[in-house]
Image: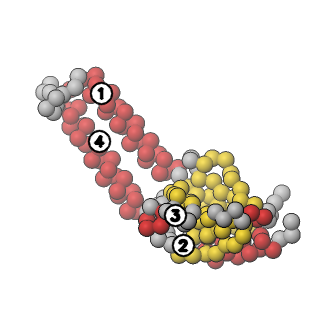
Amino acid sequence: MQKTYFKEEQHFTQLWLWIVLTIAMGAMIIPMAIGLYTQLILGKPWGNQPISDNGLLWVSGLELVFAIGLIFLFVKMRLITTVKADGLYYRYPPLILKEKEIGKDKIETFTIREYKPVKEYGGWGIKFGMGQIGKAYNVKGNIGMQLLLKSGKKVLFGTQRPDAFQHAMLKMMKEPN
């Protein structure tokens, strides 16, 4: 069994994110609830070109499934980063379920750096940066472990524990093959 030098699991816990999601879901669900009430309970057609009662029920149901799915996604989504003796491993469930590996033999250099998530990568998540900036896996914050691979590609992993991540990477790279 491989020795683990570092493991970090990050979740989307930012208050601002949950406020935005709540407002967006409310803006989507409340008008539909008003439409259901108006058309099905009061018996008045809803809107300028009302759809049938069955159509309204279907659209409302699909909208509710979408809203619940989106919230479920953000509740379950997380970044798991592990540094072992032979490389860096990561998952991003439920989007990346199977653990992926970047072997230490593929890493040219690595450094902890401050970055601008929105400007450089367009926000948080699994992101592709503009130009030569590379790919990012992040959940929150603006500190990350930047890898430059021997292939020339760049990959950044967001972290809330930069010192421990750096220490683990140094240990891993010194470990004999």
Look at the numbered disc 3 and give the secondary structure of its residue.
Answer: loop
Q: Earlier in the sequence, mark 3 or mark 2?
A: 3
Q: In front: mark 1 or mark 2?
A: 2
Q: Are marks 2 and 4 in contact (CB under 8 Å)?
A: no
Residue 14 visible (yes or no) = yes
Q: Earlier in the sequence, mark 4 or mark 3?
A: 4
Label 4 element class:
helix
Q: According to the image, label 1 marks what residue?
A: 57
Spatial separation of the CA atoms under disc 1 and disc 3: 46 Å
Q: Is residue 111 above or below residue 129?
A: below
Q: Which of the marked residues, 1 or 3, is nearer the chain's N terminus?
A: 1
Disc 4 packing (10 Å; few <14; some 14–19; many ≥20):
some
Q: Residue at x 66, y 65 (%)?
A: 152
Q: Residue furthest right?
A: 176
Is 142 left, or right, of 112 in this rendering?
left
Q: Secondary structure at mark 1?
A: helix
Q: CA distance from mark 4 to mark 3?
A: 39 Å
Find residue 61 and report its image quarter: top left
At mark 2, the secondary structure is strand
Q: Is residue 131 above or below residue 77?
A: below
Does residue 12 appear to the left or right of 163 in the view shown? Answer: left
Question: The disc labelled 1 sits on which kind of residue?
Answer: Leu
Question: CB atoms at circles 4 and 1 under 8 Å apart?
Answer: no
Q: Sort mark 3 into few (<14), some (14-19) or many (20+) by Cα contacts within 10 Å.
A: few
Q: Earlier in the sequence, mark 4 or mark 1?
A: 4
- Residue at image mark 2: 143
Tag 4 or tag 2, which sits nearer the N-term?
A: 4
Q: Quadrant of the N terminus?
A: bottom right
Quickly name the residue at label 3. 131
